[in-house]
Image (cartoon, helix red, strand yellow):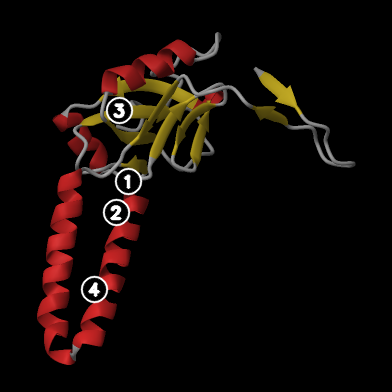
């Protein structure tokens, strides 16, 4: 469902999309990363600040916990969504006219793509699945998007099922195969 708001005088009219995403996933950090981060962070703080006094120990412990929590929450906030506008990964949006060929990437494909400099990366080491989304825009500096996902098959199906009619996502449409 597309809703339109009244444009400001002199500004171009832009649609506001309020449709819920057909696919949405947040790549949260697993509990093991929290335990490991807190263990090593607090061990270091305790070893260094122990001899400096109780106040410094308490303050540095609180600051360390805050920094570790902020880092892991930020790292685990990556959201992947497929909606009426296109494919969104974090703050980036690949609109439907520019979504090219899509495939699940195995280890060999992932390695070949990672060797390139012109790839948009949204990878998390704690997630095994990876999807390659070709970019069909010659003006875009990225050849493709390499995106971590917990369910690569579901993301692939969501992209293919929500692709507007007229956009086939063929390999010719994207530059993925043409650049080697």
Q: Considering only vertical position in the picture, is 51 above or below 147?
A: below
**Could you tell which of marks 4 and 3 lies nearer the N-terminus?**
4
Image depth: mark 1 or mark 3 in front: 1
State the residue position of label 4.
61
State the residue position of label 3.
131
In space, the residues marked 2 and 4 are separated at their CA atoms by: 17 Å
Observer-nearest of 57 and 166:
57
In space, the residues marked 4 and 3 are separated at their CA atoms by: 39 Å
Query: Is residue 4 at all visible to an observer of this figure?
Result: yes
**Could you tell which of marks 2 and 4 lies nearer the N-terminus?**
4
**Within 10 Å of the Cα at label 3, are there few (<14), some (14-19), or many (20+) other Cα atoms?**
many
Disc ID at residue 72: 2
**Quarter of the picture holding the N terminus:** top right
Image depth: mark 1 or mark 4 in front: 4
Q: Residue at x 29, y 79 (%)?
A: 59
In space, the residues marked 2 and 1 are separated at their CA atoms by: 6 Å
């Amino acid at each position: 469902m597309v809703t339109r708001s009244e444009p400001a005088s002199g500004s171009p009219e832009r649609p506001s999309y309020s449709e819920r995403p057909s696919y949405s996933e947040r790549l949260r950090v697993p509990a093991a990363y929290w335990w490991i981060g807190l263990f090593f962070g607090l061990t270091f703080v305790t070893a260094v600040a122990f001899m400096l006094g109780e106040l410094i120990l308490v303050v540095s412990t609180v600051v360390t916990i805050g920094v570790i929590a902020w880092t892991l929450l930020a790292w685990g906030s990556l959201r992947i969504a497929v909606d009426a506008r296109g494919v969104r990964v974090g703050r980036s949006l690949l609109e439907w006219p520019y979504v090219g060929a899509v495939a699940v990437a195995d280890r060999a494909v992932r390695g070949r793509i990672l060797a390139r400099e012109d790839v948009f990366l949204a990878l998390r080491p704690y997630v095994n699945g990876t999807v390659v989304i070709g970019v069909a825009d010659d003006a875009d500096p990225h050849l493709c998007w390499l995106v971590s996902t917990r369910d690569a098959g579901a993301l692939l199906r969501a992209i293919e099922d929500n692709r507007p009619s007229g956009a086939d996502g063929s390999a010719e449409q994207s530059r993925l195969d043409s650049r080697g």
